[in-house]
Amino acid sequence: MAGKKANGPMRLLRAYMFRNKDPVIDELRTVIQDQTGDRQLKSHTLRTIAEDGGPTLACMQGWFRGETKRPQNATIEAAGRALGFRRMWIKNKN
């Protein structure tokens, strides 16, 4: 319900746990590096992604160099799509 505040502690998601940054940040870093050949993720590379419809330069710098730990799905999607990619669900091999 909109506007209703959560009571009690936050529920832990056992199927999706990480200690530092969300793994999707590293996955997207690898896609960018593979696609552009820029291993350092220089500002001009990130600026090009932003100009192509991705999130802002500051947003991506927060992911790759800053304190952002849990990026919003919409911004991750926008960055990937600006590079010409889309995500899809695949079955784990567990």
Image (cartoon, rainbow, N blue to C red):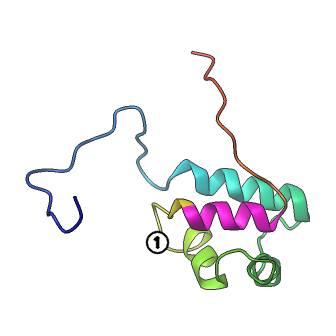
Q: Residue at x 79, y 84 (%)?
A: 51
How many numbered marks does the figure carry?
A: 1
Q: Is residue 51 above or below residue 9?
A: below
Q: How many neighbours does mark 1 have within 10 angstroms: few (below 14), some (14-19), or many (20 or more)?
A: few
Q: Position of residue 48 (x, y in %)?
A: 82, 81
Residue 74 versus residue 66: which sits nearer the camera?
Answer: 74
Magenta span dominant secondary structure: helix
Hey, which residue is sitting farthest left in the picture? 8
The quadrant in which residue 75 appears is: bottom right
Q: Position of residue 20 (x, y in %)?
A: 44, 54
**Residue beneath disc 1:** 67
Q: Residue at x 82, y 60 (%)?
A: 33
In this rendering, would 40 be left or right of 92?
Answer: right
Q: Which part of the image, by quadrant, shows the N terminus?
A: bottom left
Q: Position of residue 44 (x, y in %)?
A: 82, 84
In this rendering, would 58 be left or right of 21?
Answer: right
Q: Is residue 31 magenta?
A: no
Q: Residue at x 78, y 54 (%)?
A: 31
Q: Which part of the image, by quadrant, shows the C terminus?
A: top right
Q: Residue at x 34, y 33 (%)?
A: 14
Q: Amino acid at mark 1?
A: Glu
Range shown magenta: 74-83
Q: Is residue 62 above or below residue 80?
A: below
Residue 11 versus residue 42: which sits nearer the camera?
Answer: 11
